[in-house]
Image: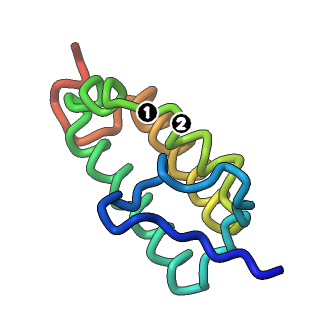
Amino acid sequence: MKFSPSLPPSLPLSPSSLPLSLPLSPPSPPSPQNAAIARESLELLTTCLKLRSSLLNAFYTLPQVEEFVSDILTGCPHPDVRLSMATQLNQLCRDLDTGTCACPSNEE
């Protein structure tokens, strides 16, 4: 028996209108090109935070930043992206701790 969901044309298609029994497939690993973009994006993010360390509090108060970091560190299927995130965060923490960030507000 073939399953074909049909909704009346007047109902909009939204996640809440889909049957709950549909299996969700796990995310596929990113392509090498997408992994490279992710690594470079992480480098850009941490570089920006180093150069404008006065904005760190604003960054950390953004909604779901903790989930963003932990999802990349533990949930990303590409090991190079996980390693890049760990390396970039480690370097950011070291630079902030030693005061080598370019922003003069480091002295606050």
Residue furthest right as drawn: 1
Question: Of residues 19 and 60, which is closer to you in this image?
Answer: 19
**Pointers 1 and 2 in contact (C-beta within 8 Å):** yes
What amino acid type should be assigned to the residue bearing mark 1? Gln
Up the image or down, 81 lies above or below 32; here it is above
In-image side of 67 versus 57 (left or right): right
For residue 84, the mark is: none
User: Which quadrant is the C terminus positioned in?
Assistant: top left
Mark 1: secondary structure: loop
Query: What residue is shown with label 1?
Result: 64
Residue 12 at what x, y percent from top left? 33, 59
- Could you say which quadrant of the image residue 28 lies in? bottom right
Residue furthest left as drawn: 104
Q: Residues within 10 Å of mark 2 (few under 14, many from 20)?
A: few
Residue 73 at what x, y percent from top left? 65, 48
Query: What residue is shown with label 2?
Result: 67
Give the Cα separation between the discs numbered 1 and 2: 5 Å
Residue 70 at what x, y percent from top left? 61, 39
Q: Image point 64% across, 76% down: which residue?
A: 4
Q: Image point 52% across, 86% down: which residue?
A: 33
Residue furthest top as drawn: 108
Up the image or down, 1 lies above or below 9; here it is below
Q: Image point 45% across, 26% down: which residue?
A: 97
User: Which quadrant is the N terminus positioned in?
Assistant: bottom right
Residue 27 at what x, y percent from top left? 67, 66
Up the image or down, 96 lies above or below 15; here it is above
